[in-house]
């Protein structure tokens, strides 16, 4: 018998209206046998992000949105946005995902379930942009993932604070999947 887990997908967004318009339909339309929710944190966007979120929220009850006022995120906007997402999460597993990441299929969450079995505590995932293949690394201890998370987040900051990523030599990821009980612990590796 396959164990199914509930997920909360958390997306920090700043001026990502176009990406959300493109990627939210597939994320909200996942063919997943269990319940899941999506939390989007708008970090004071100046584009059409608030309008896009209102449109999707009126059409889909699994979408929750919140707003991060600009004055509150002077030093660590990504970490603060994700912290708000962790607090709003309902799922047993948290997925930290960038709004610009195109998911490979409607079964993405269902496929992740197979990798969220004990002793796994955290996954990092990379989606190949050419063929949609997903590469996952499972960690049974948060300390084993600390280096790759810190390295990837430092790379993000070096690229002007954009929240996008790419495969880095020796690692990198497009998304992180972590047990909810460890959500805040993972965030200490962001923007260091």
Image (cartoon, helix red, strand yellow):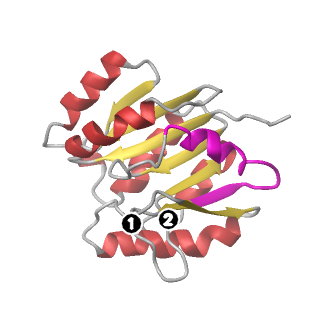
Please name whichever residue, 156 or 26, is drawn nearer the observer in this view of the structure. Answer: 26
Q: Is residue 32 left or right of residue 164?
A: right
* Range drawn in magenta: 106-124
Q: Would you identify the image quadrant in which residue 181 lies?
A: top right
Q: Residue furthest bottom?
A: 169
Cα distance between the residues tagged 2 and 1 = 7 Å
Percent from the top left, x then y, of residue 137?
Answer: 65, 65
Tag 1 secondary structure: loop
Q: Is residue 12 left or right of residue 54?
A: right
User: Which residue is painted at 21% across and 37% down in the image?
Assistant: 49
Q: How many other residues sit within 10 Å of disc 1, few (<14), some (14-19) or many (≥20)?
A: some
Percent from the top left, x then y, of residue 68?
Answer: 31, 40
Q: Which mark is residue 165?
A: 1
Whether the magenta-drawn stretch holds residue 123 is answered as yes
Tag 2 secondary structure: loop
Q: Which mark is residue 6?
A: none
Percent from the top left, x then y, of residue 136?
Answer: 61, 62
Q: Residue furthest front?
A: 131
The quarter in which the C terminus is drawn is bottom left
Q: Is residue 88 above or below residue 59?
A: below
Let me know if residue 136 appears in the view. Answer: yes
Q: Which residue is under mark 2?
A: 173
Let me know if residue 192 appears in the view. Answer: no
Q: Is residue 151 above or below residue 161?
A: below
Percent from the top left, x then y, of residue 114?
Answer: 72, 47
Please name whichever residue, 56 or 43, is drawn nearer the observer in this view of the structure. Answer: 56
Q: How many other residues sit within 10 Å of disc 2, few (<14), some (14-19) or many (≥20)?
A: many
């Amino acid at each position: 018998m396959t164990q199914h887990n509930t997920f909360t997908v958390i997306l920090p967004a700043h001026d990502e209206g176009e990406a959300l318009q493109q990627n939210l339909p597939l994320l909200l339309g996942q063919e997943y046998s269990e319940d899941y929710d999506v939390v989007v944190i708008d970090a004071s966007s100046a584009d059409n992000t608030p309008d896009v979120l209102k449109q999707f929220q009126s059409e889909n009850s699994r979408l929750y949105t919140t707003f991060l006022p600009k004055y509150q995120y002077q030093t660590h906007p990504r970490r603060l946005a994700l912290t708000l997402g962790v607090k709003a999460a309902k799922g047993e597993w948290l997925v930290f995902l960038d709004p610009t990441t195109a998911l490979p299929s409607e079964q993405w969450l269902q496929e992740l379930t197979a990798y969220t079995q004990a002793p796994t505590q955290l996954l990092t995932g990379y989606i190949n942009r050419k063929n949609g293949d997903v590469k996952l690394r499972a960690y049974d201890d948060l300390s084993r993932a600390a280096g790759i998370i810190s390295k990837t987040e430092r790379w993000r900051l070096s690229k002007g604070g954009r929240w996008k990523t790419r495969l880095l030599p020796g690692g990198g990821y497009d998304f992180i999947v972590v047990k909810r009980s460890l959500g805040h612990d993972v965030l200490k590796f962001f923007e260091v």
